[in-house]
Image (cartoon, helix red, strand yellow):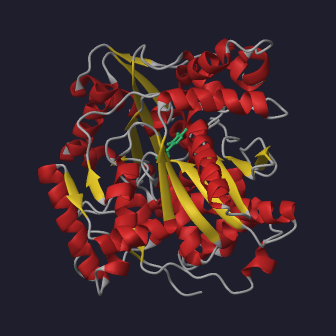
Amino acid sequence: MSSQTYRSTRASEPQSFTFEQAVLKGLASDGGLFVPSVIPQLEPDFLSKWKDLSFQELAFNVLRLYISSSEIPDEDLKQLVEKSYSTFRHDEVTPINTIDEKNGLYLLELFHGPTYAFKDVALQFVGNLFEYFLSRKNEGKPEEEKDILTVVGATSGDTGSAAIYGLRGKKDVSVFILYPTGRISPIQELQMATVLDDNVHTLSVKGTFDDCQDIVKQIFGDEEFNKKYHIGAVNSINWARILAQQTYYFYAYFQLIKQLGSSDVKVRFTVPSGNFGDILAGYYAKEMGLPVDKLIIATNENDILDRFLRSGKYQKDADVKATLAPAMDILISSNFERLLWYLARNNLASSDEEAGKTINEWFAELKSTGGFQVPSSVIDAARKDFGSERVDDSQIKETIKRVYSENPNKYVLDPHSAVGVETCYRAIGEDKAAGVQGVKYVSLSTAHPAKFADAVNDALGSFEGYSFDKDVLPDELKALSNKEMKRIFVEKADVELVKQAIVKELS
Ligand SMILES: *Cc1c(COP(=O)(O)O)cnc(C)c1O
Protein backbone atom coordinates (compact mmCIF):
# COMPACT_ATOMS: atom_id res chain seq x y z
CA MET A 1 0.00 0.00 0.00
CA SER A 2 1.48 3.32 -1.03
CA SER A 3 1.09 6.12 1.45
CA GLN A 4 -1.55 8.75 0.86
CA THR A 5 -0.96 12.33 1.96
CA TYR A 6 -2.94 15.55 1.73
CA ARG A 7 -2.34 19.20 0.78
CA SER A 8 -4.27 22.46 0.96
CA THR A 9 -6.03 23.88 -2.10
CA ARG A 10 -4.39 27.23 -1.33
CA ALA A 11 -0.81 26.06 -0.73
CA SER A 12 1.71 27.49 -3.17
CA GLU A 13 4.52 25.31 -1.84
CA PRO A 14 4.93 21.53 -1.52
CA GLN A 15 2.93 20.11 1.41
CA SER A 16 2.24 16.78 3.00
CA PHE A 17 -0.31 16.22 5.77
CA THR A 18 -1.42 12.85 7.05
CA PHE A 19 -5.04 11.75 6.85
CA GLU A 20 -5.33 12.23 10.63
CA GLN A 21 -4.05 15.80 10.40
CA ALA A 22 -6.41 16.62 7.54
CA VAL A 23 -9.39 15.24 9.45
CA LEU A 24 -8.63 16.75 12.85
CA LYS A 25 -7.73 20.17 11.44
CA GLY A 26 -10.72 20.29 9.08
CA LEU A 27 -9.74 23.56 7.43
CA ALA A 28 -6.09 24.18 6.47
CA SER A 29 -4.37 27.09 8.26
CA ASP A 30 -4.12 29.05 4.98
CA GLY A 31 -7.92 28.92 4.69
CA GLY A 32 -7.85 26.21 2.00
CA LEU A 33 -9.38 22.74 1.94
CA PHE A 34 -7.47 19.48 2.09
CA VAL A 35 -7.22 17.38 -1.07
CA PRO A 36 -5.43 14.05 -1.52
CA SER A 37 -2.00 14.33 -3.16
CA VAL A 38 -3.14 11.84 -5.77
CA ILE A 39 -6.55 10.44 -6.63
CA PRO A 40 -6.15 6.66 -6.45
CA GLN A 41 -6.98 4.72 -9.60
CA LEU A 42 -9.16 1.60 -9.65
CA GLU A 43 -7.65 -1.60 -10.97
CA PRO A 44 -8.90 -2.55 -14.46
CA ASP A 45 -10.79 -5.57 -13.08
CA PHE A 46 -12.47 -3.65 -10.24
CA LEU A 47 -15.91 -4.28 -11.68
CA SER A 48 -15.77 -8.05 -11.37
CA LYS A 49 -13.99 -7.82 -8.03
CA TRP A 50 -16.22 -5.23 -6.39
CA LYS A 51 -19.68 -5.64 -7.86
CA ASP A 52 -20.96 -8.20 -5.35
CA LEU A 53 -19.50 -6.62 -2.22
CA SER A 54 -21.68 -5.39 0.61
CA PHE A 55 -21.87 -1.67 1.34
CA GLN A 56 -19.49 -2.17 4.27
CA GLU A 57 -16.95 -4.12 2.21
CA LEU A 58 -17.04 -1.46 -0.49
CA ALA A 59 -16.64 1.28 2.10
CA PHE A 60 -13.56 -0.46 3.43
CA ASN A 61 -12.05 -0.80 -0.06
CA VAL A 62 -12.68 2.83 -0.97
CA LEU A 63 -11.42 4.21 2.36
CA ARG A 64 -8.35 1.99 2.20
CA LEU A 65 -7.24 3.71 -1.01
CA TYR A 66 -7.24 7.12 0.70
CA ILE A 67 -5.91 6.21 4.16
CA SER A 68 -2.47 4.66 4.58
CA SER A 69 -2.49 1.40 6.51
CA SER A 70 0.33 2.78 8.63
CA GLU A 71 -2.21 5.33 9.92
CA ILE A 72 -5.17 2.98 10.39
CA PRO A 73 -4.48 -0.76 10.11
CA ASP A 74 -6.95 -2.97 8.18
CA GLU A 75 -8.54 -4.51 11.26
CA ASP A 76 -9.23 -1.11 12.85
CA LEU A 77 -10.60 0.37 9.63
CA LYS A 78 -12.94 -2.62 9.25
CA GLN A 79 -14.21 -2.11 12.78
CA LEU A 80 -14.75 1.61 12.20
CA VAL A 81 -16.79 0.86 9.09
CA GLU A 82 -18.85 -1.87 10.76
CA LYS A 83 -19.63 0.31 13.74
CA SER A 84 -20.53 3.32 11.60
CA TYR A 85 -23.11 1.55 9.46
CA SER A 86 -24.58 -0.71 12.15
CA THR A 87 -26.79 2.25 13.12
CA PHE A 88 -28.61 2.24 9.77
CA ARG A 89 -32.12 0.84 9.55
CA HIS A 90 -31.70 -0.71 6.08
CA ASP A 91 -29.58 -3.82 5.43
CA GLU A 92 -28.19 -2.29 2.28
CA VAL A 93 -27.44 1.01 4.07
CA THR A 94 -28.15 3.04 0.90
CA PRO A 95 -30.59 1.07 -1.29
CA ILE A 96 -31.77 2.13 -4.74
CA ASN A 97 -35.46 2.32 -5.45
CA THR A 98 -37.05 2.27 -8.91
CA ILE A 99 -39.18 5.39 -9.19
CA ASP A 100 -40.08 5.45 -12.87
CA GLU A 101 -38.91 2.37 -14.72
CA LYS A 102 -40.17 3.46 -18.11
CA ASN A 103 -38.05 6.59 -18.01
CA GLY A 104 -35.04 4.93 -16.36
CA LEU A 105 -35.27 6.93 -13.15
CA TYR A 106 -33.97 5.52 -9.87
CA LEU A 107 -33.66 7.00 -6.42
CA LEU A 108 -30.62 6.38 -4.26
CA GLU A 109 -32.02 6.54 -0.73
CA LEU A 110 -29.46 8.05 1.59
CA PHE A 111 -31.79 8.64 4.53
CA HIS A 112 -31.83 5.33 6.40
CA GLY A 113 -29.45 6.53 9.11
CA PRO A 114 -30.35 7.59 12.65
CA THR A 115 -31.50 11.13 11.76
CA TYR A 116 -33.19 10.31 8.45
CA ALA A 117 -30.84 12.48 6.36
CA PHE A 118 -27.93 11.81 4.02
CA LYS A 119 -25.44 13.52 6.33
CA ASP A 120 -25.59 10.46 8.59
CA VAL A 121 -23.64 8.42 6.02
CA ALA A 122 -20.62 10.64 6.62
CA LEU A 123 -21.15 11.77 10.20
CA GLN A 124 -21.62 8.31 11.68
CA PHE A 125 -18.15 7.52 10.34
CA VAL A 126 -16.60 10.88 11.31
CA GLY A 127 -17.75 10.52 14.93
CA ASN A 128 -16.11 7.12 15.23
CA LEU A 129 -12.99 8.41 13.52
CA PHE A 130 -12.63 11.32 15.97
CA GLU A 131 -13.00 8.93 18.88
CA TYR A 132 -10.44 6.55 17.36
CA PHE A 133 -7.81 9.25 16.87
CA LEU A 134 -8.41 10.77 20.32
CA SER A 135 -8.28 7.44 22.18
CA ARG A 136 -5.03 6.64 20.46
CA LYS A 137 -3.51 9.97 21.50
CA ASN A 138 -4.80 9.59 25.04
CA GLU A 139 -3.75 6.01 25.63
CA GLY A 140 -2.00 5.67 28.99
CA LYS A 141 -2.24 9.40 29.78
CA PRO A 142 -3.52 10.52 33.18
CA GLU A 143 -6.98 12.09 33.09
CA GLU A 144 -5.79 15.72 33.35
CA GLU A 145 -3.39 15.40 30.41
CA LYS A 146 -5.86 13.88 27.99
CA ASP A 147 -6.65 15.59 24.69
CA ILE A 148 -10.30 16.50 24.47
CA LEU A 149 -12.39 17.88 21.65
CA THR A 150 -15.31 20.25 22.05
CA VAL A 151 -17.38 20.39 18.88
CA VAL A 152 -19.46 23.55 18.57
CA GLY A 153 -21.92 24.19 15.76
CA ALA A 154 -25.06 26.11 14.80
CA THR A 155 -28.03 24.65 12.98
CA SER A 156 -31.11 26.03 11.28
CA GLY A 157 -32.72 22.69 12.00
CA ASP A 158 -31.69 19.91 9.64
CA THR A 159 -28.03 19.31 10.16
CA GLY A 160 -27.53 19.62 13.92
CA SER A 161 -29.07 16.26 14.66
CA ALA A 162 -26.73 14.40 12.29
CA ALA A 163 -23.74 15.87 14.16
CA ILE A 164 -25.29 14.97 17.52
CA TYR A 165 -25.99 11.39 16.49
CA GLY A 166 -22.50 11.11 15.05
CA LEU A 167 -20.85 12.18 18.30
CA ARG A 168 -23.19 10.92 21.04
CA GLY A 169 -21.47 8.78 23.64
CA LYS A 170 -18.00 9.22 22.11
CA LYS A 171 -15.09 9.26 24.57
CA ASP A 172 -13.25 12.56 25.13
CA VAL A 173 -15.56 14.42 22.73
CA SER A 174 -18.34 16.85 23.69
CA VAL A 175 -20.80 18.44 21.30
CA PHE A 176 -22.71 21.71 21.65
CA ILE A 177 -25.32 22.56 19.02
CA LEU A 178 -26.97 25.99 18.99
CA TYR A 179 -30.33 26.59 17.37
CA PRO A 180 -32.70 29.58 17.31
CA THR A 181 -35.52 29.18 19.85
CA GLY A 182 -38.90 28.59 18.21
CA ARG A 183 -37.49 28.81 14.69
CA ILE A 184 -36.95 25.14 13.95
CA SER A 185 -39.69 22.56 13.51
CA PRO A 186 -40.88 20.54 16.53
CA ILE A 187 -39.55 17.32 15.01
CA GLN A 188 -36.12 18.84 14.42
CA GLU A 189 -35.97 20.05 18.00
CA LEU A 190 -37.11 16.66 19.31
CA GLN A 191 -34.48 14.85 17.26
CA MET A 192 -31.74 16.83 18.96
CA ALA A 193 -33.08 17.43 22.44
CA THR A 194 -34.12 13.83 23.15
CA VAL A 195 -30.50 12.68 22.94
CA LEU A 196 -29.64 12.44 26.62
CA ASP A 197 -25.99 11.34 26.49
CA ASP A 198 -23.78 13.26 28.92
CA ASN A 199 -21.53 14.55 26.12
CA VAL A 200 -24.40 16.05 24.07
CA HIS A 201 -25.66 19.58 24.72
CA THR A 202 -28.46 21.24 22.78
CA LEU A 203 -28.65 25.01 23.23
CA SER A 204 -31.86 26.86 22.46
CA VAL A 205 -30.75 30.44 21.84
CA LYS A 206 -33.15 33.38 21.83
CA GLY A 207 -32.28 34.86 18.43
CA THR A 208 -32.02 33.97 14.76
CA PHE A 209 -29.96 31.33 12.98
CA ASP A 210 -27.53 34.07 11.91
CA ASP A 211 -27.10 35.05 15.57
CA CYS A 212 -26.28 31.43 16.40
CA GLN A 213 -23.79 31.23 13.56
CA ASP A 214 -22.17 34.51 14.63
CA ILE A 215 -21.73 33.20 18.15
CA VAL A 216 -20.09 30.04 16.84
CA LYS A 217 -17.72 32.12 14.69
CA GLN A 218 -16.80 34.27 17.68
CA ILE A 219 -16.07 31.17 19.74
CA PHE A 220 -13.81 29.83 16.98
CA GLY A 221 -12.04 33.20 16.88
CA ASP A 222 -11.45 33.25 20.65
CA GLU A 223 -7.91 31.93 20.88
CA GLU A 224 -7.75 31.60 24.63
CA PHE A 225 -11.04 29.73 24.86
CA ASN A 226 -10.02 27.58 21.95
CA LYS A 227 -6.72 26.61 23.51
CA LYS A 228 -8.36 25.63 26.74
CA TYR A 229 -11.28 23.63 25.35
CA HIS A 230 -9.98 22.49 21.93
CA ILE A 231 -12.91 23.73 19.91
CA GLY A 232 -13.57 21.72 16.77
CA ALA A 233 -16.13 21.55 13.98
CA VAL A 234 -17.63 18.79 11.89
CA ASN A 235 -18.67 21.04 9.03
CA SER A 236 -19.14 19.98 5.49
CA ILE A 237 -15.61 20.79 4.33
CA ASN A 238 -14.08 18.01 6.43
CA TRP A 239 -12.28 15.61 4.10
CA ALA A 240 -13.52 12.55 5.98
CA ARG A 241 -17.10 13.46 5.06
CA ILE A 242 -16.33 13.68 1.35
CA LEU A 243 -14.44 10.42 1.56
CA ALA A 244 -17.18 8.48 3.35
CA GLN A 245 -19.76 9.63 0.80
CA GLN A 246 -17.87 8.09 -2.13
CA THR A 247 -19.00 4.58 -1.16
CA TYR A 248 -22.61 5.04 -2.20
CA TYR A 249 -21.75 6.06 -5.75
CA PHE A 250 -19.97 2.73 -6.17
CA TYR A 251 -22.70 0.81 -4.41
CA ALA A 252 -25.47 2.44 -6.46
CA TYR A 253 -23.63 1.80 -9.72
CA PHE A 254 -23.19 -1.90 -8.94
CA GLN A 255 -26.79 -2.34 -7.74
CA LEU A 256 -28.09 -0.68 -10.89
CA ILE A 257 -26.09 -2.70 -13.41
CA LYS A 258 -26.97 -5.89 -11.56
CA GLN A 259 -30.64 -4.97 -11.63
CA LEU A 260 -30.44 -4.17 -15.36
CA GLY A 261 -28.32 -7.24 -16.08
CA SER A 262 -25.89 -5.18 -18.16
CA SER A 263 -23.11 -2.69 -17.73
CA ASP A 264 -23.76 -1.27 -21.17
CA VAL A 265 -25.59 1.79 -19.83
CA LYS A 266 -24.80 5.44 -19.36
CA VAL A 267 -25.30 6.18 -15.68
CA ARG A 268 -25.92 9.77 -14.69
CA PHE A 269 -26.16 10.89 -11.08
CA THR A 270 -28.32 13.86 -10.16
CA VAL A 271 -27.50 15.46 -6.83
CA PRO A 272 -29.48 18.06 -4.85
CA SER A 273 -26.62 20.38 -3.98
CA GLY A 274 -25.82 23.10 -1.48
CA ASN A 275 -22.26 23.06 -0.20
CA PHE A 276 -21.21 20.66 -2.99
CA GLY A 277 -20.06 17.93 -0.59
CA ASP A 278 -22.41 15.21 -1.78
CA ILE A 279 -21.74 15.59 -5.50
CA LEU A 280 -18.01 16.15 -5.00
CA ALA A 281 -17.81 12.60 -3.64
CA GLY A 282 -19.23 11.48 -6.99
CA TYR A 283 -16.53 13.43 -8.80
CA TYR A 284 -13.84 11.55 -6.89
CA ALA A 285 -15.51 8.22 -7.69
CA LYS A 286 -15.61 9.17 -11.38
CA GLU A 287 -11.98 10.31 -11.35
CA MET A 288 -10.98 7.02 -9.73
CA GLY A 289 -12.43 5.25 -12.73
CA LEU A 290 -16.07 4.49 -11.91
CA PRO A 291 -17.81 4.74 -15.30
CA VAL A 292 -20.16 7.63 -14.50
CA ASP A 293 -21.42 9.35 -17.64
CA LYS A 294 -22.29 12.64 -15.97
CA LEU A 295 -22.89 14.31 -12.61
CA ILE A 296 -25.77 16.76 -12.62
CA ILE A 297 -25.89 19.55 -10.05
CA ALA A 298 -29.45 20.27 -8.95
CA THR A 299 -29.88 23.57 -7.13
CA ASN A 300 -32.86 25.33 -5.62
CA GLU A 301 -33.30 29.10 -6.07
CA ASN A 302 -29.92 29.61 -4.41
CA ASP A 303 -28.33 28.83 -7.71
CA ILE A 304 -24.69 29.97 -7.65
CA LEU A 305 -23.57 26.56 -8.95
CA ASP A 306 -26.07 26.48 -11.80
CA ARG A 307 -25.09 30.01 -12.82
CA PHE A 308 -21.41 29.04 -12.75
CA LEU A 309 -21.97 26.07 -15.05
CA ARG A 310 -23.85 28.29 -17.48
CA SER A 311 -21.59 31.36 -17.45
CA GLY A 312 -18.20 30.46 -15.97
CA LYS A 313 -18.73 33.20 -13.42
CA TYR A 314 -18.77 32.32 -9.75
CA GLN A 315 -20.83 35.18 -8.40
CA LYS A 316 -22.24 35.51 -4.91
CA ASP A 317 -25.90 36.61 -4.62
CA ALA A 318 -26.81 39.48 -2.30
CA ASP A 319 -29.09 37.43 -0.05
CA VAL A 320 -29.91 33.85 0.75
CA LYS A 321 -33.42 32.90 -0.35
CA ALA A 322 -35.48 30.84 2.08
CA THR A 323 -36.79 27.91 0.01
CA LEU A 324 -38.72 24.68 0.60
CA ALA A 325 -35.36 22.86 0.52
CA PRO A 326 -33.62 24.72 3.37
CA ALA A 327 -30.57 22.43 3.66
CA MET A 328 -29.53 23.79 0.25
CA ASP A 329 -30.03 27.47 1.08
CA ILE A 330 -26.48 28.79 0.68
CA LEU A 331 -24.75 31.83 -0.82
CA ILE A 332 -21.45 30.20 -1.67
CA SER A 333 -20.72 26.54 -1.84
CA SER A 334 -17.86 25.66 0.47
CA ASN A 335 -16.66 22.42 -1.14
CA PHE A 336 -16.70 23.88 -4.64
CA GLU A 337 -13.17 25.13 -3.95
CA ARG A 338 -11.98 21.54 -4.24
CA LEU A 339 -13.43 21.13 -7.73
CA LEU A 340 -12.02 24.51 -8.75
CA TRP A 341 -8.60 23.31 -7.61
CA TYR A 342 -8.81 20.26 -9.89
CA LEU A 343 -10.09 22.36 -12.76
CA ALA A 344 -7.18 24.78 -12.32
CA ARG A 345 -4.70 21.95 -11.84
CA ASN A 346 -5.80 20.05 -14.94
CA ASN A 347 -6.42 22.95 -17.30
CA LEU A 348 -4.31 25.95 -16.30
CA ALA A 349 -1.46 25.00 -13.98
CA SER A 350 1.63 22.92 -14.50
CA SER A 351 1.95 21.96 -10.84
CA ASP A 352 -0.03 21.62 -7.59
CA GLU A 353 1.70 24.73 -6.33
CA GLU A 354 0.58 26.80 -9.31
CA ALA A 355 -2.97 25.55 -8.91
CA GLY A 356 -2.80 26.78 -5.30
CA LYS A 357 -1.77 30.22 -6.54
CA THR A 358 -4.68 30.35 -8.98
CA ILE A 359 -7.15 29.39 -6.23
CA ASN A 360 -5.73 32.16 -4.04
CA GLU A 361 -6.23 34.70 -6.82
CA TRP A 362 -9.81 33.59 -7.49
CA PHE A 363 -10.77 33.61 -3.82
CA ALA A 364 -9.14 36.98 -3.20
CA GLU A 365 -11.31 38.34 -6.01
CA LEU A 366 -14.40 36.64 -4.60
CA LYS A 367 -13.70 38.31 -1.28
CA SER A 368 -13.07 41.78 -2.67
CA THR A 369 -15.64 41.93 -5.50
CA GLY A 370 -18.11 39.13 -4.72
CA GLY A 371 -17.22 37.05 -7.77
CA PHE A 372 -14.70 35.85 -10.34
CA GLN A 373 -14.73 34.62 -13.93
CA VAL A 374 -12.79 31.51 -14.96
CA PRO A 375 -11.19 31.09 -18.42
CA SER A 376 -13.19 29.22 -21.06
CA SER A 377 -10.86 26.19 -20.93
CA VAL A 378 -11.90 25.72 -17.31
CA ILE A 379 -15.62 26.00 -17.85
CA ASP A 380 -15.44 23.71 -20.90
CA ALA A 381 -13.68 21.10 -18.79
CA ALA A 382 -16.28 21.44 -16.02
CA ARG A 383 -19.10 20.85 -18.51
CA LYS A 384 -17.56 17.56 -19.62
CA ASP A 385 -18.21 16.07 -16.18
CA PHE A 386 -21.09 18.18 -14.91
CA GLY A 387 -24.48 19.44 -15.95
CA SER A 388 -26.77 21.64 -13.86
CA GLU A 389 -30.36 22.76 -13.33
CA ARG A 390 -32.15 25.21 -11.06
CA VAL A 391 -35.48 24.21 -9.53
CA ASP A 392 -37.81 26.71 -7.86
CA ASP A 393 -40.31 26.17 -5.04
CA SER A 394 -43.35 25.72 -7.27
CA GLN A 395 -41.50 23.08 -9.30
CA ILE A 396 -40.52 21.32 -6.06
CA LYS A 397 -44.20 21.03 -5.11
CA GLU A 398 -45.21 19.94 -8.60
CA THR A 399 -42.57 17.20 -8.56
CA ILE A 400 -43.69 15.87 -5.16
CA LYS A 401 -47.23 15.71 -6.60
CA ARG A 402 -46.14 14.13 -9.88
CA VAL A 403 -44.16 11.31 -8.29
CA TYR A 404 -46.89 10.63 -5.71
CA SER A 405 -49.55 10.35 -8.38
CA GLU A 406 -47.52 8.50 -11.05
CA ASN A 407 -45.47 6.06 -8.97
CA PRO A 408 -47.29 2.73 -8.40
CA ASN A 409 -46.44 2.83 -4.69
CA LYS A 410 -47.37 6.50 -4.21
CA TYR A 411 -43.81 7.36 -3.36
CA VAL A 412 -43.44 10.50 -1.23
CA LEU A 413 -40.38 12.67 -1.95
CA ASP A 414 -38.96 15.22 0.44
CA PRO A 415 -38.44 18.70 -1.07
CA HIS A 416 -34.64 18.30 -1.46
CA SER A 417 -34.98 15.00 -3.28
CA ALA A 418 -37.67 16.61 -5.44
CA VAL A 419 -35.08 19.11 -6.69
CA GLY A 420 -33.04 16.15 -7.94
CA VAL A 421 -35.99 14.33 -9.49
CA GLU A 422 -37.24 17.42 -11.35
CA THR A 423 -33.72 17.82 -12.72
CA CYS A 424 -33.82 14.22 -13.98
CA TYR A 425 -37.15 14.76 -15.69
CA ARG A 426 -35.78 17.76 -17.55
CA ALA A 427 -32.78 15.74 -18.70
CA ILE A 428 -34.99 12.81 -19.68
CA GLY A 429 -37.10 15.21 -21.77
CA GLU A 430 -33.99 16.55 -23.49
CA ASP A 431 -32.70 13.02 -24.17
CA LYS A 432 -36.03 12.10 -25.73
CA ALA A 433 -36.06 15.17 -27.94
CA ALA A 434 -32.50 14.44 -29.07
CA GLY A 435 -33.14 10.72 -29.58
CA VAL A 436 -30.53 9.73 -26.97
CA GLN A 437 -31.04 6.22 -25.60
CA GLY A 438 -29.61 3.92 -22.96
CA VAL A 439 -29.26 6.55 -20.24
CA LYS A 440 -30.23 5.75 -16.66
CA TYR A 441 -30.68 8.44 -14.04
CA VAL A 442 -29.89 7.90 -10.38
CA SER A 443 -31.23 10.76 -8.32
CA LEU A 444 -29.82 11.08 -4.82
CA SER A 445 -32.48 11.26 -2.15
CA THR A 446 -31.05 13.26 0.72
CA ALA A 447 -33.80 13.30 3.35
CA HIS A 448 -36.86 11.42 4.54
CA PRO A 449 -40.08 13.34 3.78
CA ALA A 450 -41.18 13.19 7.43
CA LYS A 451 -38.52 15.79 8.23
CA PHE A 452 -40.21 18.37 6.01
CA ALA A 453 -43.85 17.95 6.93
CA ASP A 454 -45.03 21.43 5.91
CA ALA A 455 -43.75 21.26 2.33
CA VAL A 456 -44.90 17.69 1.85
CA ASN A 457 -48.37 18.32 3.28
CA ASP A 458 -48.69 21.47 1.25
CA ALA A 459 -48.01 19.48 -1.93
CA LEU A 460 -50.06 16.38 -1.10
CA GLY A 461 -52.75 17.58 1.31
CA SER A 462 -55.40 17.79 -1.41
CA PHE A 463 -54.98 14.18 -2.59
CA GLU A 464 -57.80 11.98 -1.42
CA GLY A 465 -56.67 9.36 1.04
CA TYR A 466 -53.32 11.00 1.75
CA SER A 467 -52.34 11.01 5.42
CA PHE A 468 -49.02 12.30 6.73
CA ASP A 469 -49.29 10.33 9.97
CA LYS A 470 -50.11 7.08 8.21
CA ASP A 471 -48.18 7.37 4.92
CA VAL A 472 -45.11 9.37 5.82
CA LEU A 473 -44.27 9.56 9.52
CA PRO A 474 -42.19 6.58 10.74
CA ASP A 475 -43.07 5.12 14.16
CA GLU A 476 -39.62 5.94 15.45
CA LEU A 477 -40.17 9.66 14.81
CA LYS A 478 -43.72 9.49 16.17
CA ALA A 479 -42.34 8.10 19.41
CA LEU A 480 -39.99 11.06 19.89
CA SER A 481 -42.75 13.28 21.24
CA ASN A 482 -43.14 11.06 24.30
CA LYS A 483 -39.46 11.17 25.15
CA GLU A 484 -37.69 13.26 27.74
CA MET A 485 -35.92 16.38 26.43
CA LYS A 486 -32.67 17.95 27.57
CA ARG A 487 -32.18 21.57 26.51
CA ILE A 488 -30.20 24.52 27.76
CA PHE A 489 -32.02 27.81 27.26
CA VAL A 490 -29.82 30.81 26.47
CA GLU A 491 -31.89 33.90 27.15
CA LYS A 492 -30.00 36.25 24.85
CA ALA A 493 -27.94 35.80 21.66
CA ASP A 494 -24.74 36.61 23.48
CA VAL A 495 -21.41 34.86 23.08
CA GLU A 496 -20.50 35.25 26.76
CA LEU A 497 -23.70 33.49 27.88
CA VAL A 498 -22.99 30.63 25.49
CA LYS A 499 -19.39 30.35 26.66
CA GLN A 500 -20.55 30.25 30.26
CA ALA A 501 -22.97 27.45 29.41
CA ILE A 502 -20.20 25.47 27.71
CA VAL A 503 -17.80 25.89 30.64
CA LYS A 504 -20.49 24.88 33.12
CA GLU A 505 -21.37 21.72 31.20
CA LEU A 506 -17.76 20.71 30.68
CA SER A 507 -16.84 21.00 34.37
C1 LIG B 1 -26.84 19.00 3.35
C2 LIG B 1 -28.00 18.61 2.53
C3 LIG B 1 -28.01 18.78 1.12
C4 LIG B 1 -26.87 19.43 0.36
O1 LIG B 1 -25.70 18.67 0.36
P1 LIG B 1 -24.30 19.36 0.05
O2 LIG B 1 -23.29 18.34 0.34
O3 LIG B 1 -24.22 20.55 0.98
O4 LIG B 1 -24.32 19.78 -1.37
C5 LIG B 1 -29.13 18.37 0.42
N1 LIG B 1 -30.21 17.84 1.05
C6 LIG B 1 -30.23 17.66 2.39
C7 LIG B 1 -31.45 17.09 3.02
C8 LIG B 1 -29.13 18.03 3.18
O5 LIG B 1 -29.18 17.86 4.50
In the picture provided, is 266 more to the left or to the right than 21?
Answer: right
Q: How many marks?
A: 0
In the picture provided, is 265 more to the left or to the right than 357?
Answer: right
Farthest left residue in view: 368
Which image quadrant: the N terminus?
Answer: bottom right
Which residue is pictured at 54% across the width and 43% down the height? 167
Which residue is pictured at 66% across the width and 58% down the height? 248
Which image quadrant: the C terminus?
Answer: top left
Residue 59 at x, y = what percent?
68, 64
Q: Quadrant of residue 374?
A: bottom left
Which residue is pictured at 66% across the width and 37% down the height? 114
Q: Quadrant of residue 132?
A: bottom right
User: Is residue 151 positioned above or below 125 on the image?
Assistant: above
Residue 142 at x, y = what percent?
45, 54
Q: Nearer the viewer, residue 164 or 414?
A: 414
In the picture provided, is 470 more to the left or to the right than 481?
Answer: right
Which residue is pictured at 25% across the width and 62% down the height? 29
Residue 303 at x, y = what percent?
38, 43
Q: Nearer the viewer, residue 129 or 393?
A: 393
Q: Nearer the viewer, residue 166 or 395?
A: 395
Q: Quadrant of residue 337?
A: bottom left
In the picture provided, is 305 more to the left or to the right than 80?
Answer: left
Instruction: Mark yes or no: residue 12 visible.
Output: yes
Q: Nearer the viewer, residue 160 or 106?
A: 106
Instruction: Mark yes or no: residue 7 visible.
Output: no
Residue 223 at x, y = what percent?
19, 47
User: Is residue 311 positioned above or below 100 on the image?
Assistant: below
